[in-house]
Each structure stands twice: as C-alpha cells, then as structure tokens.
Image (cartoon, rainbow, N blue to C red):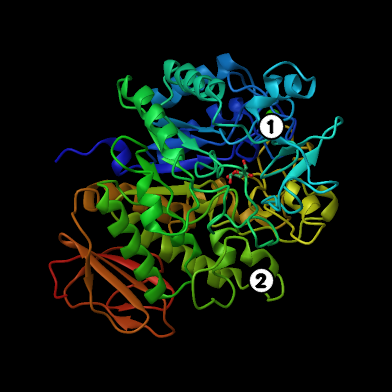
Amino acid sequence: MNKSWWETAVVYQVYIRSFADGNGDGIGDIAGLRSRLPYLSALGIDAVWVNPWYPSPMADAGYDVADYRAIEPTYGTLAEAEEFVADAHAAGIKVLLDIVPNHTSDHHDWFRAALAGEPGARERYLFRPGRGELPPNDWQSVFGGPAWTRVEDGLWYLHLFAPGQPDLNWMNPDVRDEFEKVLEFWFDKGVDGFRIDVAHGLVKAEGLPDRGVVTEGVQHNQAHPAWDQDEVHEIYRGWRAVANRYAPERIFIAEAWVPGNERLARYLRSDELHTAFQFDFLRAPWRASSLRSVVQDAMSAAASVGAPPTWVLSNHDVTRTVTRYSRSQPDGLVETDWERARWAEEDADHELGRRRARACALLQLALPGTAYIYQGEELGLEEIEDLPDDVRQDPTWVQSGFTDVGRDGCRVPLPWSGSSVPYGFSPNATTTTWLPQPGHWGSYTVAAQQDDPDSFLNLYRAALALRPIRWVDAGAVRWLAGPPGVLAFARGDVQCWVNTGDVGVDLPDGCDVLLASAPGVGSVLPPDAAAWLAAACDS
Ligand code: GLC
Ligand code: CA
C-alpha cells in the first residue's frame, strides 16, 4: 500500500523565536530560518512545523494571535514567509504552520471591537455576568489563577490561558467562517498543513457549568467542561472539507490533551483530522514496561481509526528529554508539568539523561507512524533550569504566583557555533538573546558536533538516514521477549532493542548492529542504550 508522506514523516518543530536570528536583534526570525534550511535538509527531516509566527503582543510567546493573516514584524514579512515556503519545498521539506483557534490575542480587532461594545462583537467571545463579585464559574486558567477577567462595564470574559488570550465562542458562525477562510489563506500560499493548538478546547459545555473541583490550573488531560466536548468534532469535519479541496494533500495534526486514547481516536475519524499528538510517550518514565505499554496503547488506538500513531518526546511546553531522564524516574505516567516542581529538588545527571535520550530517539524513530523532533533535541540540549527570574517570559511564572517557573527553560536560543554566547545564533556577536544561553553550550553547538562521529547530531543524522531504508515500510511491531528492563521488537527483518535496566544484556546471536546509541555495542547492549539490528538472527 502506498503511504502518504504524512503517515511516516519525521517533523522538525521550529520554535521560531529561538531557532536562528537573521537580523541581529537576538530574536529568531524567518531570515534566520531560511538561512538554516540546508541544516534541516542535511538532518534528513521531511517537514517542519513552525510555531506561531503571526503578529502578537507576545503575552504567550505568539499563542496570542492579533492577526491570523500576517507575520509578526519581529519575525519578518509575509513576502519572506512565502519565500520560506518556496525554499522549503525546493529542498523537499513540507511546511506545517500552527493555528490557534481556541483564543485570539486581546489585541485582535475582534476583541477590541468587543471591548468597545460594538454590536455583535461580544458574541464572538465568552462574556458573562459574574456571581456577585465572583467570576461566572469556578474554572481556573491553565497557567494558574481564575480563567476570567472582568472588563470595565462589569462583565467577565473567559480565558483558559492568559488574560491576553480571550477564548472564542465557537457556537458563533462568524468564528467558524473566519477560521475556514484563514485555513484557505495559508493553503493558497502552499502551506501543507496545520498543527492545531488546544484542539480539544474549542467547544465548552453548554451553560459553562462549574467544574466542581477547584484544582490549581486546569489539567489538560482531565475531564473538564472546557475540554473535549463532543460538539468539537463538527468543527473539524468542516476543516477537513476545506483541506480536501486542495491538492497536493493538506493535513492537520491535533494538539489534543484528552483522557485516554479512545477519546483521542475520535479526532482521527476519516472525515476529521489526519493525526494527533500522543503525549503519553513523553509522560512515560524511562522504564521498559511503561514505554512498552504506552507504545502499544497508542498503536492500538491509532489503528482503531486507521490513523498513523505519532511519537513526541518533547516540545516547547515540556521539560527537555535529557533533563526528564536525568533524575530518578517515577513509577507511572506523569503530568506534563510535574517535573518542574518535583525535579528541581534532585540533582540532575545530564550525562545519564543524554544516554537515555539517545536511546529513546532510536526507539522513537524505529516505531511505525510519524515522529516529531523539537529543535535542539538533536543536539542533546538540556532544560535550562536556572534562568534568572527577571528574564522569565512564560506567563505561567506570573500567573502561578511565582511558584511554577514555566516553560522558558526549553525555549532557550539554539547554539550553532563558537564557544561563547550567542553561539552563532545571531550574526551580531554582541546581541542579547531574548532568553540567555548558558555558558557551557560551546560543546553542544552544531559546529562542534558536526565532525564528531559519536555526537548526538550524528546519531540523529544516521538514524534519519536509515529510517526510510529500514523502518518505514517494515510493517507492524512484533514484541520480542527480552530480559527485565528491556524493550525489544521486530518489524519485518529489523529489530530495535532498548535497555532501560542497570545491567548489560546479550543481544541475539548473529545480528548485525546497524546503529547503536552508545559506542562499541557488539554482542552486549549496555544499560541506558538502544540498538537497531539487522535481524537475520534469532529472536
Ligand atoms: C498550547 C501551546 C502552548 C500555549 C497554549 C495556549 O498548549 O502548545 O504553548 O501556551 O496552547 O495557546
Ligand atoms: Ca531577529
């Protein structure tokens, strides 16, 4: 069966603010991104997903969009964006954008009109009277604090995230029409698809009922009247119909935090979205049994609706993989923001984290379906946990009452070359980058890793070069028996072995090691390592 590109793609996530700075102001931009396309080509990825690049007052790093049809001036112009799409296509790389339909910025024309009291304008958002002096219901913002802000005339508006991100009212046909037109606007420019931000949040339960349990922040993957309402699917049927009018194929990937794979699969029915992120993989501790069960669950759920599974180890919202794996591992799945609070207490062993992250990359890239790489993951970067408080930008920090440091630590600008800041991130060597880079990243730059055969970067390159040859058409996963702590499977005549235990394990006799995450792997796979085997061997 001929698969479409998106069913097996490796997608590289570009956090544009931190990828590469073209004009020297210390902030990543389209010019920087274009100049680094050869790097992405050489890495061997199939597509990029670019985080929001639209005009924004940056209350939430661009997830507060003021205009869906333009480019943030700090990042460049619409003409440059179009040139980028053309350049990427010429390099054989597909381009996915990020669409943010749950909320706009409070600087969006619609919200300004709503505040000004223009007729009909408030119906596009969720304005409600309070209960006396209290907000309309008990919902908490994902970033902390109440999900409601009061405006001058006494009404309150809902914002599941920052106050600068008012939630749209998707029951209003204006909203539906507008977003379908926004999709067309970018599809007409050749964009290949969209990652849908907070795809599970658009429709709220009728009457906006109290949740009943007041938690700190709204946990994304728990049942909540703001999340995962059945009516949301109708919206995506409309979006799919828009995408289906285009050739070549235009696709969607949902960011949907829902309680369980059965709920997730509903977003992937054949007349809805193409794929959805499956976050259990990144919530699993470094333990063979946990990894195996999340992998199996995700594959079964995706198979139940004929969609490819997706594999994500990190993104701009969660602690970097190296750091997650650099401390003691919990027993079960973890909440995504668990690590920041809990782990700051325990010293991080980043070299241990790096060995595990390398091994997990080989696991990720051997699985069927699509894989996402968050920029810097291929360099083995760790979370920067000791940013000075006064440089933090994530609204989580303020809204949590300075108890949750937020997500800035995974958003630090990439190191490209040289031994001191800004490590080639900017053409201006004296610029101050928007978040400070650490002093010890000189050995993690692209340039430093380029010629070292054992580097993180070269492991990724080798894996990405082998993946299409060995794995993409290799068929279904067959689990193999292995010693405790070992996860092993075959697909066709290739095998992937991952050792999460404390002792080395014997690999099957007579196998060729195609690629290993640790140096010198022969007949024994050391702890915290993975290997790909050509399996004309016993299993
Ligand atoms: C998504 C984004 C996150 C953002 C939030 C609100 O979860 O990934 O970065 O803060 O939505 O738009
Ligand atoms: Ca710049």
Q: 139 and 96: which one is in front?
A: 139
Residue at 42% over, 30% down: 193
Inspect the image, locate mark 2, and give the three-letter code of the amino acid beneath it.
Trp
Which residue in the structure is indicated by mark 2? 343
The picture places residue 390, in percent across and down from the top left corner, at 85, 50
Q: Is residue 184 visible?
A: yes
Q: 151 and 8: which one is in front?
A: 151
Mark 2 secondary-structure assignment:
helix
**Quadrant occupied by the C terminus:** bottom left
Mark 1 secondary-structure assignment:
loop
Q: Is residue 133 left or right of residue 147?
A: right
Question: Is disc 2's CB within 8 Å of ligand 1?
Answer: no
Residue at 45% over, 39% down: 231
Residue at 45% over, 63% down: 358
Dot 2, crowdedness within 10 Å: few (<14), some or many (≥20)? some
Question: Is disc 1's CB within 8 Å of ligand 2?
Answer: no
Q: Is residue 86 above or below residue 4?
A: above
Q: Is residue 11 above or below residue 323?
A: above
The picture places residue 60, in percent across and down from the top left corner, at 70, 40
Inspect the image, locate mark 1, and give the three-letter code of the amino acid beneath it.
Pro
Q: Is residue 15 left or right of residue 48?
A: right
Q: Is residue 179 above or below residue 408?
A: above
State the mark number for residue 350: none
User: Ligand 1 quadrant?
Assistant: top right
Q: Nearer the viewer, mark 2 or mark 1?
A: 2
The picture places residue 2, in percent across and down from the top left corner, at 17, 38
Q: 174 and 310: which one is in front?
A: 174
The picture places residue 410, in percent across and down from the top left corner, at 63, 52
Q: Is residue 73 visible?
A: no
Mark 2 and mark 1: Cα distance apart in space: 35 Å
Which residue in the structure is indicated by mark 1? 427
**Quadrant occupied by the N terminus:** top left
